[in-house]
Amino acid sequence: DSRATDPHTNARRLRRLAQQGLPDLLVVSTAGGQEYLAEIGLQAHHVPLGYRPGHGRDLGLERDLDVLFIGAPDVPRRKRALRSLRRHGVEVAAVGGWGDARFWGENRTRLLNRAKIVLNISRHEGQFSGQRLILGMANRALVVSEPMYRPEPFVSGFHYVECSLDEMPGVIERFLADAGAREQIATDGHRFVTSERTHDRSVARLVELIRG
């Protein structure tokens, strides 16, 4: 059910399936998810999400948007965070949502290519969103994220920048002013997802698990 975005709803359904002897193989995309399932008695394997061409590419466009959030900005926790950033002088363009076709496919790629910084603000505190990190890095924007629980394989300071919501206005200001530092991390993140953290590698690991 696409409306089930909290971990507890999905965990309850998985436990009901497990009581029926299903699934034979359970694979999750986050290390934190694997750890949580182990705590409730469900064995799972961790295979991170991987980059594929549909996530975007570096188009070499002028980056005329300082800060972009793309997702569902009407989530209460995000609304509060975005409002706080704007009060501190950060001009954030916040757009998107699952049902808005304007922010999918090539339109999304072009928009992300216009951004210097892409924000990651989760629905729930500490939640890891590999998809949003991949999107920002694939389009060679600097990802600035609030702290996430077990974000591997991504490393803060190398592939993206992690800071608290309170620290975020100052961090954003610093990286907007320092184009060299911003582009270095953005380029390293881009190289990592497009060459090392690919969809093909993730699928190969899935096939290996299935065969095993």
Image: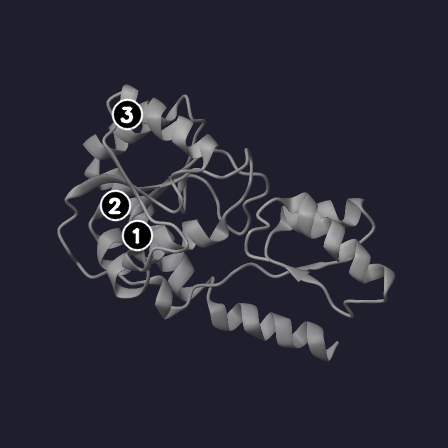
Q: Secondary structure at mark 2?
A: helix
Front residue of 95 and 194: 95
Q: Which residue is mark 3?
A: 86
Q: Which residue is mark 1?
A: 187
Give the residue type that dot 1 points to: Thr
Classify residue 92 as left or right of residue 44: left
Residue 45 drawn above or below residue 78:
below
Location of residue 93 in the rendering, given as x and y in whole percent from the top left corner: 25, 39
Location of residue 46 in the rendering, given as x and y in whole percent from the top left corner: 65, 58
Q: CA distance from mark 1 to mark 3?
A: 27 Å
Quarter holding the N terminus is: bottom right
Q: Residue at x 35, y 53 (%)?
A: 137
Of marks 1 and 3, the one in the foreground: 3
For marks 2 and 3, the one nearer the N-term is 3
Give the residue type that dot 2 points to: Glu
Q: CA distance from mark 1 to mark 2?
A: 6 Å
Disc 1 and disc 2 in contact, CB within 8 angstroms = yes
